[in-house]
Image (spheres, helix red, strand yellow):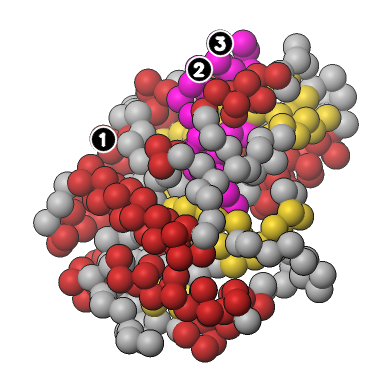
């Protein structure tokens, strides 16, 4: 089978030339110029670490928060720079006090690590976890909204809602859900791990109590760069996972929230320092605005999913308007013996080892099936999905 064409943009990333890389969604991928810029920051840190942390870092991090705030439309003082969305979810859930009269609402499509955090805080406090069943396939937003709202009781304290679900790749009607829940007095923790750089976000308008998003996924920033947005009226409830100097610093004109989140101990903060560069330079590098990048990736995933569905004779499990730049399909298998959620699906291994295609395929118990999730980023070419479809047709037949 002829190897697929690569996008002309592929040269900007250091991805393995031999691999057909269709999994931007799991960990992102960072362009070479961004890694060079991060390296430049590492050198600045080591030139004089004292001067860096005491003089340069506060200004650099303010610029990074301002760049993010401008991108996702919020006050930069309501943002904390953190390492990843998992720690964002942990920060909120571990800061809040729960008791046996509280319920935590979580849809069954939630990312497992975040679901584990919900279960952990519920177990230690006696709070009850209410799992909301969202079907998959799912054909309209109303079903999702209705299922979630049906799970709300007067005990519901917080709901963990995804912007885009990880296993099923559905763009949730999160703006409407947040509005309805917050108006009912339920705090929303918006898991926008797939958020900034993937879908337009206007945090002030959305109005969620808490939002966390990864910069290392769709913004293509270096690994370990993410943010947490906490609405002003709730900031005094929230503390970083690591308590440090900020807890007792005199307030002056800086909020306790700022003091606490701006310093959580010595660490490499080069990934955070690079964020303004990421936002301005990636757009220049590819010759598109971020809005155009998001639209391009959305268009590509729609075309890519069509190709796979046609070739494999699969009905699309959600309408195109529920797609962002990832798409999940349930493969046509009914025998699930010898498959486990804890081990790679043999199809994943065959695609990788025999055909050099990096794409997640996994077994999931509810709704039971073997799933594949494709991602579309600017470095991908439609030809790569066509190649995957042809290979997959053979692999599935065998
Ligand atoms: C919905 C969702 N939440 C949270 C995460 C966790 O992201 P991270 O590993 O960067 O913390 C992911 C990762 O894929 C995700 O898809």
Tell me how far mark 3 sits from mark 1, CA to CA: 26 Å
Q: State the residue in front, 257 or 180.
A: 180
Instruction: Judge depth for marks 2 and 1 and give the one in front.
Output: 2
- What secondary structure is found at the residue carrying circle 3? helix
User: In which quadrant is the N terminus drawn?
Assistant: bottom left
- How packed mark 3 is, by other alpha carbons closer than 10 Å (few <14, some 14-19, many 20 or more), is few
What residue is shown with label 3? Answer: 183
Q: State the residue in front, 161 or 267.
A: 161
Tell whether circle 2 marks a residue whose Cβ is less than 8 angstroms from ligand 1: no
Residue 384 appears in view: yes
Q: Which residues are magenta?
A: 160-187
| Residue 54 among those drawn in magenta | no
The residue at 54%/46% (across/down) is: 317
Residue 237 appears in view: no
- How packed mark 1 is, by other alpha carbons closer than 10 Å (few <14, some 14-19, many 20 or more), is few
> Could you tell whether 333 is left or right of 198 in the image?
right
Indicate the position of residue 258 as horizontal and vertical percent values: 45, 34
Up/down of 148 relative to 308, above or below: above
Disc number placed over residue 70 in the picture, else none:
1
CB atoms at circles 3 and 1 under 8 Å apart?
no
CB atoms at circles 3 and 2 under 8 Å apart?
yes
Tell me how far mark 3 sits from mark 2, CA to CA: 6 Å
What residue is shown with label 2? Answer: 179
The residue at 66%/78% (across/down) is: 346
Indicate the position of residue 60 as horizontal and vertical percent values: 28, 50
User: In which quadrant is the C terminus drawn?
Assistant: bottom right
- What secondary structure is found at the residue carrying circle 2? helix
> Could you tell whether 293 is left or right of 157 in the image?
left
Disc number placed over residue 266 in the picture, else none:
none
Indicate the position of residue 163 as horizontal and vertical percent values: 49, 38
Indicate the position of residue 177 as horizontal and vertical percent values: 54, 23
- How packed mark 2 is, by other alpha carbons closer than 10 Å (few <14, some 14-19, many 20 or more), is some
């Amino acid at each position: 089978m002829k190897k697929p064409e690569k996008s002309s943009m592929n040269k900007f990333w250091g991805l393995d030339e031999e691999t057909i890389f269709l999994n931007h969604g799991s960990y992102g991928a960072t362009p070479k110029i961004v890694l060079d810029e991060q390296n430049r920051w590492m050198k600045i840190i080591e030139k004089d670490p004292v001067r860096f942390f005491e003089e340069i870092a506060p200004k650099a991090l303010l610029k990074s928060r301002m760049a993010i705030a401008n991108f996702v439309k919020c006050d930069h003082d309501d943002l904390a720079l953190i390492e990843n969305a998992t720690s964002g979810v942990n920060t909120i859930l571990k800061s809040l006090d729960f008791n046996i009269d509280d319920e935590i609402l979580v849809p069954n499509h939630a990312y497992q690590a975040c679901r584990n955090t919900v279960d952990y805080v519920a177990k230690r406090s006696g709070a009850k976890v209410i799992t909301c069943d969202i079907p998959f396939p799912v054909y309209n937003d109303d079903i999702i909204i209705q299922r979630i709202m049906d799970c709300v009781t007067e005990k519901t304290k917080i709901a963990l809602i995804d912007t885009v679900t990880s296993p099923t790749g559905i763009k949730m009607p999160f703006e409407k859900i947040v509005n309805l829940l917050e108006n009912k007095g339920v705090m929303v923790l918006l898991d926008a791990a797939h958020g900034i750089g993937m879908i337009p976000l206007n945090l002030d308008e959305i109005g969620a109590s808490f939002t966390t998003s990864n910069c290392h996924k769709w913004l293509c920033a270096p690994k370990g760069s993410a943010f947490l947005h906490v609405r002003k009226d709730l900031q005094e409830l929230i503390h970083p996972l690591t308590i440090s100097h900020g807890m007792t610093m005199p307030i002056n004109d800086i909020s306790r929230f700022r003091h606490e989140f701006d310093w959580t101990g010595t660490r490499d903060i080069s990934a955070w320092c690079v964020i303004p560069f990421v936002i301005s330079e990636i757009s220049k590098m590819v010759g598109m605005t971020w809005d155009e990048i998001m639209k391009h990736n959305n268009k590509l995933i729609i075309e890519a999913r069509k190709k796979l569905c046609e070739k494999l004779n699969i009905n699309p499990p959600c309408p195109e308007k529920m797609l962002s730049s990832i798409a999940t399909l349930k493969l046509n298998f009914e025998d699930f013996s010898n498959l486990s959620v804890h081990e790679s699906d043999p199809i994943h291994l065959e695609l990788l080892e025999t055909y050099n295609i990096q794409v997640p395929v996994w077994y999931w118990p509810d709704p039971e099936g073997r799933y594949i999730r494709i991602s579309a980023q600017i470095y991908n070419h439609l030809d790569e999905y066509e190649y995957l479809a042809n290979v997959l047709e053979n692999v599935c037949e065998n």
